[in-house]
Amino acid sequence: MGGTDLEARIQTFVDPQSHAHIGVIAVISEKEFVWAQVVIPDLGAYSGYQDWLDSREGFQIGLAMAGVDVKMISVSLSPFLVWSRLTGTQPTERTLDAFASMLLILRRPPVPAALAVVKRREFEAYARTVEAFAPHADFEDWARHRAALQSAAADSGARIEPLPVHVDDFVEWGQCLRERTSEAMLDRYAALILEFLTDEERS
């Protein structure tokens, strides 16, 4: 398998700080591998954990020989599956590596502030019941408002990470805690999800 083929299988990018060509390879623990083979269909092709590790190490060696700086990132399945649900991506070996790549970037200081991203259909479904949406005539107005917030934060030097959220989950969370469904609480909810996704102790 040549360098181009490897890079097609493993996500690579140019690091804006070091300018090095980086490749990110996800590694899950042996104790989670059996579960992983159930929820990530690609992994069913491997006879066992060691077979999968050998494949991962083969990618690492091949990329290194192609001049790519390879990072092996430990990934826990629960945050990966939450991220897959939020982003609407299928849990595959390739998206597992994409999630690991995201973790590598997000764990770098400074810690980013989460900005909740809401889909049109969810905004429209909850427009009359969620406090955060009430001041906005329609989804376009909401989207312009959120884009302006993101732009202002970026102009101030803040690091912002837009994060998809499910409004029904947010509403249920607010009800459990007896919290308002304000815009500030929506972003607070997104921040908690981001913290869960990037927690290094969980990996």
Image (spheres, rainbow, N blue to C red):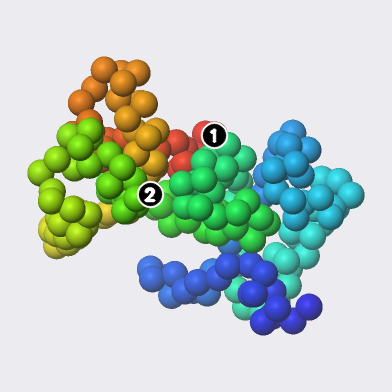
Report the residue marked by disc 1.
202
For the view shown, which residue lies furthest in the left direction? 135
Where on the picture, by quarter, is residue 65? bottom right
Which residue is pictured at 17% across the width and 34% down the height?
Answer: 131
175, above or below 194, in the image: above
The image quadrant where one finds the C terminus is top right
Q: Is residue 101 above or below residue 8?
A: above
**Disc number placed over residue 164 in the picture, else none:** 2
The 10 Å Cα crowd at callout 1, few under 14, some 14 to 19, many 20 or more, is few
Q: Residues within 10 Å of mark 2 (few under 14, many from 20)?
A: some
Report the residue at 30% width, 25% height from top: 174
**Circles 1 and 2: CB atoms closer than 8 Å:** no
The image's mark for residue 109 is none
| Image quarter of the N terminus | bottom right
Task: Give x and y (percent) for residue 195.
Answer: 40, 38
Q: Is residue 90 visible?
A: yes
Front one among 150 and 4: 150
Q: Is residue 78 left or right of residue 181?
A: right
Helix, strand or loop status at disc 1:
helix
Give residue 59's position: percent from left, percent from top.
Answer: 73, 66
Question: Where residue 69 sits: x, y (%)?
Answer: 58, 69
199 or 172, nearer to the observer: 172
Q: Residue at x 64, y 61 (%)?
A: 94
